Image: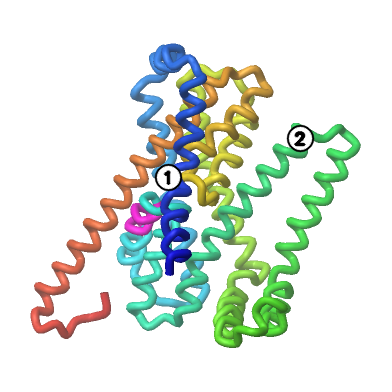
Amino acid sequence: MLASKWLRRLRLGLPAVGLAILVVMLARLDREAMIAQMSHISGAHFALAALLFAVNACLKCLRWLRLVRTYDIVLPHREGILAFFASIFYGMVTIGGVGEITRIGVLIARDVQWSRALVSCLFDRVLDVSLLSIIACVALIHNYLPPPGRYYSFAVLAGVVIAAILGGQRIVQWCASSVKSWPIIRNMPNQAERIKSLFEATLPCVRFAKLCELVLWTIISWVGYMGTMLVLADGLAIQVSPWSVIAASALGGLTILLPISFQGVGTREPMFVLVLGREGVSQEQAVLLAMLGFWVVYFTAIAIGLMGIAGQAARRRALSISHPSGDHEKP
């Protein structure tokens, strides 16, 4: 009992590690120079950056609706959009963005099988993490390997990506058929059955044509986020190649998954310093860009999320008025 209590406290306290890292970094930087740098950026840059992130959110919403249609689920567009937007809010206020899983509520309410509802959200996240991981791998290979090893590594990476797209269905089928024999899982039959159900629900998403479509949606949607960071870099007059900003943004985005920070606060900034510093960008500029990117994305996402929550509340009120007896359609 005592051990579980301390584990809970540890989990709650882990995000403070990232904040501590940021505080230490800021204490060692020239804060006056950072404030002076802020004078370079205009309101138009902030507005355009927020708009591009909003485009990113809308495109991801369309991708999720297309993913849901994979299962022939009839979900009204307005209901799906509101659920997705609301989940953005819950994702931004939870560690690792786990709150995004709330969007499956509209599917469960329509009697969608739990495994399909969950996969529709989890696979969405897998696509994002995979794209950021590929960009991060390209950046690390390009920056830290000499030419002979670089070309070999690029070829291996390309081969892995192509194999994953072409053989995705076979890989998932193998996982579904063999999961009950996995060393860690085989002694937990109930858990093995649940994991098998998730793999089986993933199969329609990894068919070659569908997977290619979802990958394309993913690439297009992330153009909006990368555009946000490029606009902010331009506003701060940071003289650096667009590729470096994209690479830093990808590495920083992956740090959101780390349990030692809240939304990457304190872990994303070192990634920007590491990547942008190779082109002579000062630590002050790199950290400032990372922080501004976080705040623009955070407040824009919160605004979009609150719109979704308000829309859902208005819809529930409308349903309760039109069906006062309580016998109304599924929300």
Q: Give the residue at mark 2.
A: 142
Image coords of residue 22 (percent x, y): 48, 32
Residue linked to disc 1: 55
Q: Is residue 2 left or right of residue 274?
A: left
Examine the structure image and report whether residue 86 is included in the region drawn in magenta: yes
| 10 Å crowding of disc 1: few (<14), some (14-19), many (20+) | some
- Whichever of labels 2 and 1 marks the residue nearer the N terminus, that label is 1
Name the one closer to the observer, 234 or 130: 130
Q: Nearer the viewer, residue 79 or 153?
A: 153
Q: Amino acid at mark 1?
A: Val
In the image shown, does 76 or 287 lie closer to the viewer? 287
Q: Is residue 104 magenta?
A: no
Q: Which residues are magenta?
A: 85-91
Mark 2 crowdedness (10 Å alpha carbons): few <14, some 14-19, many ≥20 = some
Q: Is residue 286 visible?
A: yes
Q: Position of residue 157 (x, y in %)?
A: 78, 50
Q: Between label 2 and label 1, give the one nearer the viewer.
A: 2
Furthest residue in direction bottom, as rendered = 189
Residue, x 87% and y 33% (percent of image)? 147
Residue at the image position 39 percent from the left and 35 percent from the top: 295
Assign the magenta stretch its main secondary structure: helix
Would you say 203 lies left or right of 54 here?
A: right
Q: Are marks 2 and 1 in contact (CB under 8 Å)?
A: no
Going by the numbered disc 2, the residue's amino acid type is His
Between 193 and 319, the one lying in front of the other is 193
Q: Position of residue 15 (x, y in %)?
A: 45, 46
> What residue is shown at x 11% (from left), y 75% (from top)?
322
